[in-house]
Amino acid sequence: MCGTENGVASQAPNGTHPPPNPNAATAPYHGVEDHLSNVGRYKIIESTLREGEQFANAFFTTEQKIKIATMLSDFGVDYLELTSPVSSPQSYEDCKTICKLGLKAKVLTHVRCNMEDAKKAVECGVDGVDLVIGTSSFLRQYSHGKSMAMIQTTAIEVIEYVKSKGVEVRFSSEDSFRSDLVDLLTLYKAVDKAGVNRVGVADTVGGATPRMTYDLIRTLRGVVGCDIETHFHDDTGCAVGNAISALEAGATHVDTSVLGIGERNGITPLGAMMARMVVSAPEYTKTKYNLKMLKDIEEYVASCVQVNIPFNNPITGATAFTHKAGIHAKAILANPSTYEIIDPSLFGINRYVSITSRLTGWNAVKSRVVQLGYELTDDQIKEVTAKIKQMADIRPLAIDDTDSIIHAYNMNLREEKGI
Ligand SMILES: CC(=O)SCCNC(=O)CCNC(=O)[C@H](O)C(C)(C)COP(=O)(O)OP(=O)(O)OC[C@H]1O[C@@H](n2cnc3c(N)ncnc32)[C@H](O)[C@@H]1OP(=O)(O)O
Ligand SMILES: O=C(O)CCC(=O)C(=O)O
Ligand SMILES: [Zn+2]
């Protein structure tokens, strides 16, 4: 007997499939959901005005801080993290000023895990206080001298105080990856029980790999119920990779700074993170963030701290969307997704196809010929391409040089034809 049960077709005896049952339920097909991953709903804690101020070349005036905070809030980040108000009288005043701006982004300040710092933070009118204390044996010995038991007791007192003021609180262990795992999990469990909004995991020295990150966050995800914030330094070039791994493992928040500025060579850059996330979570990222602002934000911060944007910066680097080799250029001109993972127009940026080198092919030259308004046959374009390569073998060319070769070739043709 052949037929269907619950809308599922069984095999007919002769090996053929029976016709579909018109009464079968039309339930949609379901993919496999990754319940642990927060890649599609990640949040950004933007720390240019905290970690970024720790960059060797950073000195932000109050006006610059206001402009950076406003731009980042308009860009769509969830939180702005500001320098500790305990650092200096101006830091205290600036923190209060930014809190009063009425920005869309919530304002946090980052302080040591002690009562005096926490009181100063709350005084400023912040939405949240980010508490931090080193938990690795190195930092316990050389930074603050406290045992794990002392850290836990103080942390709980401070957390209860901040919460009693109706302010969000996060507790973070500095140097998490070099801390004893059992110590760390015990502490996180205790602060979670005390009611923190988030715990923070920090790769303070930039030594973690994506797999180490995944393992730690995944383990932590099983221990605490609160949100998990992550902070990655880039000393070994893993800051973006670690951030995406953390989200895959269940972290909810990632710290960034514009251009990655921070202590030493900094942390996960906002722009690189957007590049990663527009690929990993396109709909969420395009809807939530005002991506076309990225270039202006980076240029502004670069000017404040007097650095150039590196040529290979994701998205905004001068060559990030420049295609040079002939094989690439041909395919890009036919369909940009052949050699691009990101559409530059999402960020308001143009792609550029180079036709000025010995690697240039005739298909790329053809597109320039058309742009210049000439009508040449394919054979003629191949001849022009040979001339470009001949010249490019001698010296580097600018676009004006190749344009001149095309103009000259076209003029010769017209003269030959007596036009
Ligand atoms: C990894 C990171 O980026 S963490 C954030 C780093 N941020 C900052 O350092 C903010 C800017 N810092 C500052 O302005 C100053 O360091 C201040 C105001 C915080 C402290 O200044 P000072 O009192 O002069 O102390 P100093 O900076 O020399 O040493 C740090 C002090 O904080 C203590 N400390 C360090 N971390 C912590 C902590 N998480 N919780 C409590 N105390 C801590 C140290 O024991 C040391 O105290 P000491 O006076 O007993 O020596
Ligand atoms: O507070 C945190 O989570 C991070 C502190 C910090 O900047 C670091 O550990 O590198
Ligand atoms: Zn840091």
Image (tube, rainbow, N blue to C red):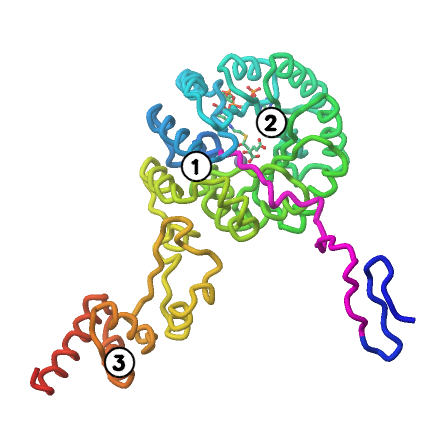
Q: Which quarter of the figure has residue 13?
A: bottom right
**Residue 179, image x, y percentages:** 69, 37
Estimate the spatial distance between the alpha carbons at disc 2 and disc 3, rounded to whole Å: 64 Å
> Is disc 2 placed on a helix, strand or loop?
strand
Amino acid marked by disc 1: Phe
> Is disc 3 placed on a helix, strand or loop?
helix
- Which quarter of the rendering shows the N terminus? bottom right
Badge number at residue 377: none
Whether ligand 2 has any atom under 8 Å from the Cβ at mark 2 is answered as yes
- The answer to whether 191 appears left or right of 247 in the picture is right
Amino acid marked by disc 3: Ile
- The answer to whether 379 appears left or right of 2 in the picture is left
Tag 3 residue: 381
Badge number at residue 75: 1
- Which quarter of the rendering shows the C terminus? bottom left
Estimate the spatial distance between the alpha carbons at disc 2 and disc 1, rounded to whole Å: 27 Å
The tag earlier along the polypeptide, 3 or 1, is 1
Estimate the spatial distance between the alpha carbons at disc 3 and disc 1, rounded to whole Å: 45 Å
Badge number at residue 132: 2
